Each structure stands twice: as C-alpha cells, then as structure tokens.
Image (cartoon, rainbow, N blue to C red):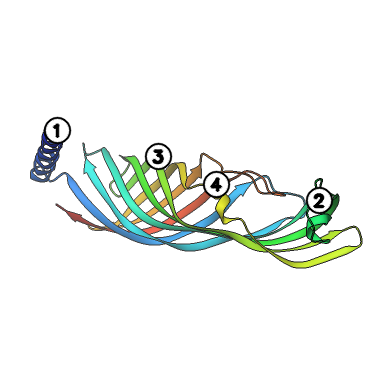
Amino acid sequence: MKNCLLNLSLIFVLFTSTVSYLRSQSRISIYAQGGVLIGSPFGEIPEGATGKPGVRASTGAELKWTITHKLSAHIGALFAHKSNEFQTPVTGKYNISDGVLGIKLPFPINVNYRGTVYGAISNKYVDIPVYAGFQVGRRTMLALGYQYSHLLDGRFDGTADVRALALNFPGQEFDESHLLRKDDHAVIAGMHYQLFAPMEIRLRFGYGLNNIFTEIPDGMSSLRNLYLGLMVAYGFSL
C-alpha cells in the first residue's frame, strides 16, 4: 500500500512539474469548443434502403501542447451525439408458433417474412481525441490521430411492417439498444483555421474502426461511425 501511494505521489509530482515547466515556456493552451456533428453509422446498404444523416451537438475542451512552431500534440474530452434515421427492407425467418399461436413448441415453425423497418440510431458518447497538429501556414493547421469513444447512452429502435404468408403485422415496435457496443475507436483527420488570435474554426472527419454492434441485428449489416464535425474553438494560454 505504501509503495502504491509513493508511486502515485511520484507520478503526481512529475505531472505537476511537467505542466509547470510547459506553462513557464508558454507551450500549453486549452481550447473550449462547440459545434455540430454531421453523419451516420455507415455500412453495406441494402437495395431500396434510404436514410437521413443526423445533425447533432458536440461540445467540450482540448489541450494543446506546442512542441515546435510546426508541430503540436493535442488531447481532448468532448460530448458527442451521433445519430441517423433510416428505412430499409428486411427479410428473414419468423416463428409463427410464438408470434401467432402464442404457444411454446419444442420446435419452431418458421416461415419466410418480408418487411420494412423504420428506425433510428441515437448514440451519446464521450469522445477522447489524441492527435498531432502540423502547422502548414500562418493560420492553417492539419490534424491526424486517433479517437476513443465511450457510449454514455445508446438507442437503436423503431417500428417494422412485416408480412409472413398471408399475415400482415404493421407497426411492430422493436428496441435492440442492448446490442450497441460500449466502446468505439476511430481514425481522425482535420484542419484548424485561425480566424483571429484566440478563435479557430475546426473541421474534423472521423472514420470508425469497428462495428457499433456487439451482435449484428437481423436484417442489418455491420455499421461503423462516419462523422464530420464543424466546431468553433476559443483558446486560453496557461
């Protein structure tokens, strides 16, 4: 226990000493930023499917460490709402013994079904971007790095109009939010443009590296987050 406390104390002293040194060199800045994310979870699109990308808020703060006049390191923590709406045809097997007869049999009575799903994905994350900045002009910086996201609240639900044999089941509600993955990873790239000394416009593209589902729902495909962020950032030197 004493060794653990000693190690933590040493790490704290080292961290505070490093921050104090960087502050003395005027190399650390904090940016408060806010704006919108435009995009959608994206994957293989079934024939006849349509969708509408979400436009949702993102806000938070980032720390910038200026290493040289051409190179900087950045880390941040941002709230990010990523969503979309979609309509897609689906096909599959339907167990009429459970769904129609309402009885449990030792074996399923499956029939083919066709239908249309009207759904939405609405996921709220904490995004933690870590990236390098490359100054390419007096006002322009290019950014490239990685982003980890943790799901705070996720929703994947909607309704389905289903036809099986001569039977129609309109407006069947579904909620498969439990299939959403809690963690997401992305490659990020973007550009910062300085309007004037403390204020910047930031454009950032994020490409998800993994499926947003732990298990792909029936009739769906693997989806990954694909979003474009447009932000306004205001900086403060420490």
| First of labels 2, 4 by sequence position | 2
**Spatial distance from mark 3 to mark 2, Cα to Cα?**
50 Å
| First of labels 1, 3 by sequence position | 1
| First of labels 4, 3 by sequence position | 3
Q: Is residue 110 above or below residue 162?
A: above
Q: Percent x, y for residue 161?
A: 77, 64
| First of labels 2, 1 by sequence position | 1
**Spatial distance from mark 4 to mark 1, Cα to Cα?**
37 Å
**Spatial distance from mark 1 to mark 3, Cα to Cα?**
29 Å
The 10 Å Cα crowd at callout 2, few under 14, some 14 to 19, many 20 or more, is few
Front label number (4 vs 3): 4
For this view, does 147 lie left or right of residue 164?
Answer: left
Task: State the residue at coordinates (16%, 53%).
Answer: 237
For label 1, the residue is 7
Q: Percent x, y for residue 18?
A: 12, 38
For label 3, the residue is 146
For label 4, the residue is 212
In front here: 181 or 84? 181
Amino acid type, label 2: Leu
Amino acid type, label 3: Tyr
For label 2, the residue is 105
**Spatial distance from mark 2 to mark 1, Cα to Cα?**
61 Å
Q: Is residue 222 above or below residue 163?
A: above
Front label number (2 vs 4): 2
Q: Secondary structure at mark 4?
A: loop
| First of labels 3, 2 by sequence position | 2
